[in-house]
Amino acid sequence: MHIISQSFSSSSLHHCILKLFSKTISSSSSSKLPHYKTKSQFKWRTNHVFVQTNPLLSLLETKCKYMNQLKQIHSQMILTGIFSNGFASSRLIAFCALSEKGNLDYCKKILYNMENPNTFSWNMAIRGCCESETPIDAFFLYKQMLMTVENEFSCLKPDNHTFPLLFKICSRLGLYYMGQEILVHVLRIGYDGDVFVHNAVIHFLVSCGFLEDAYKVFDDSFVRDLVSWNSMINGYVRSGRSREALMVFEKMKMESVEPDEVTIIGMVGACAQLEDLELGRKLHRYFRDKCLYFSVPLCNALMDMYMKNGSLNEAKALFDRMDERTVVSWTIMISGFAKFGCLDEARRLFNEMPERDIVQWNALIGGYVQAKRNKEALVLFQEMQTMNIKPDEVTMVSCLSACAQLGALDIGIWLHHYIKRHKLCLTVSLGTALVDMYAKCGHIEKTLQVFHEIPIRNSLTWTAAIGALAYHGNGHDALSYFLKMVDSGLRPDDVTFLGVLSACRHGGLVEEGRKFFAQMTTKFNIPPKSKHYSCMVDLLGRAGLLEEAYELVQGVSNEADASVWGALCFACRVHRNIEMGEKAALKLLELDPGDSGTYVLLANMYVEANMQQKARDVRKMMGERGLQKTPGCSSVEVNGNIFEFFVTDKTHPQSDQIYECLIQLTGLIEIVECFPYIRYDLLFDSDVYSAIQENSLLALGEG
């Protein structure tokens, strides 16, 4: 018998699996897959009579700490003749294979030089390989075992512990075809009716993604145990097929199979995926009515389900009732509160945590960025630095996003230097964040430099570069990058086309805009969204093609939102088309009657058309409805600090000096408008400036 067998075709093997595994499984078989501890967890059963009556074995399992001691014990076992005993030799092999003080290579040497090693010895060596850094070596051991089996004097053969070990490796490494070969051996040797092997096969097929085959094996069996049910339920959940998981669970209840913690965690995960809060509550009540023990992992799963379904209070109630909490418990709560914008509560929990790692820091920083509280996100990052917490890729992406939203170029450059200094891998997501940060901070040269330095670029990276070129007025370059992106085989999405249409809009490229807008549906099958229509309306409006823009809006009246009608209204104001502008403004007021900007736009349009009464009527309507113009806001970065200013804002400690400077700048602007021929540098001469302020043309001439 050989490990690589060509005697079964793929289709015939598939048929045999489904047919033979549907046999009745012996009820005397154990009901669970064997659970193998890792080396660090391995414990010996030292109370065995043979161990207690043989000092060498007792010494091996209680006192041995180094390989030279193990070799001495091995020598003594050979000299005293104990090694010829199958039990004693198998204990030595097991120690070498599984103990953290053992040596797998030495284990193999012992095994290969034994006359008749028993199945237990082979299984221990295979298990040692399975838990090692080179699990693939287990298949070479298995092949050696099969060569021993072929010896006519040997009574050795693989058993129901051998095959689950091999299937476990196939599952972990995704070795589907190797698993098929192992299945051939299972069928030939006749272990297809063993529940150990049966469950290992289901787990193997589920892990490799063959859920239909796994369910066929599972469903055709007359006897199933709880492990079988759990393998199918959790397999469906891990594959994102939660509806099928629910169906299996319902069938499980119909057959009166009692769930355990693994079942419950799987089902709660299914509810989280489906975002079905009511079903999650129903399952919670069902498990509670069954008086099942709510362990920490189960409570964590329930909290995660409630958080993902937006029920923060129920998650918090569970958290408060927990007698014991793990890092996962705290992380779920902090991440959930941060995700839903409850940042004060998230920060409170964060401060109460007994121990924190990078995951919780990232969750909180990401929450601040998502809530547009970018300055606080960067402050938190600085706090993280003072505590010597090493940031990772997720941290840097969040901080770069904060810099991009604030326009904090100096901090963004510092973060870039930090990435280089600490040799963080420039992954696609990190590189894209850098490109986006430099683009939104206005450093187009650095944007393109970083873009070309990234070893691997995805569609998001290309989209960031296209958007950067578009918003900086380099329309032709943006379109050139788009064509290169398509030629590289990457598929654009709706965000990419938003950058492309913006490039056409800023560059006044009407024909190109029409072409790419049409290609969205005809070539790439991407339905335009309101933002795309808004870009096209703005493009046509800037070019003075108001009738075409109006027809486009009318043709998609169901898709047109405030941004689309707003673009049309603004274009009408620029080109002084009062009639069409009124229509657009009235539609805007219908869509959002509380938007003060629409009233201001319409009033200004009337003023510019010398329709003062209508302008007064609009302002009166604003007053009657209690609306005020939204104050403007601007920000500036000075020495790495971000300062924000609102209209009439006097909260800054240097507000008096700032307003004085603004008054002077306003005066200079007025002078330039009145005297466009004046030399620019003279404006900053104090005497000349004073003379001009006093309207002294004589002094101006002398200057």
Image: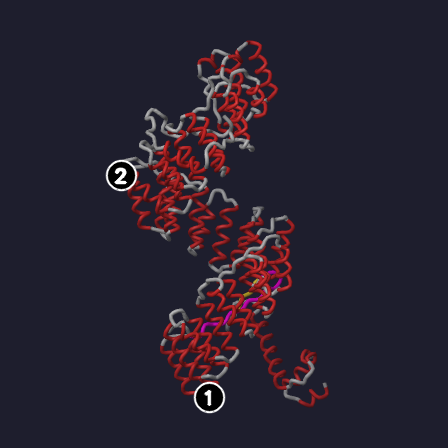
Q: Is residue 491 above or below residue 509?
A: above
Residue 564 x/y as whole percent: 44, 72
Q: Residues within 10 Å of mark 2 (few under 14, many from 20)?
A: few
Residue that numbered label 2 is attached to: 254
Residue 630 counted in the magenta span: yes
> Residue 394 location in percent, x, y?
53, 50
Could you say which disc has been placed on residue 676 in the image? none
Which sits earlier in the primary sequence, circle 1 or circle 2?
2
450 vs 328, left or right, is right
Q: Is residue 144 above or below residue 689?
A: above
Q: Going 64% across and 63% down the picture, which residue do you hit?
A: 445
x and y, in percent, of residue 428 in the image? 57, 53
Q: In the rendered image, is residue 67 in sight?
A: yes
Q: Identify the amino acid type marked 2.
A: Met
Most foreground residue, 77 or 539: 539
The residues tagged by marks 1 and 2 sit, at their Cα atoms, a distance apart of 79 Å
Q: Nearer the viewer, residue 459 or 92?
A: 459
Q: Nearer the viewer, mark 1 or mark 2?
A: 2
| Badge 1 density bin: few <14, some 14–19, many ≥20, Cα 10 Å | few
Which segment is the magenta one?
Answer: 628-641
Residue 361, percent across and down?
A: 51, 49
Residue 472: image quadrant is bottom right
- Please state, as top left, top right, bottom left or bottom right, where the C terminus lies in the image: bottom right
**In screen coordinates, is 217 left or right of 54?**
left
The circle drawn on residue 610 is 1
Q: Secondary structure at mark 1?
A: loop
Q: Residue at x 47, y 68 (%)?
A: 532
Residue 98 visible in the displayed image = no
Amino acid at circle 1 = Asn
Q: Quadrant of residue 144?
A: top right
Is residue 176 in the magenta section? no
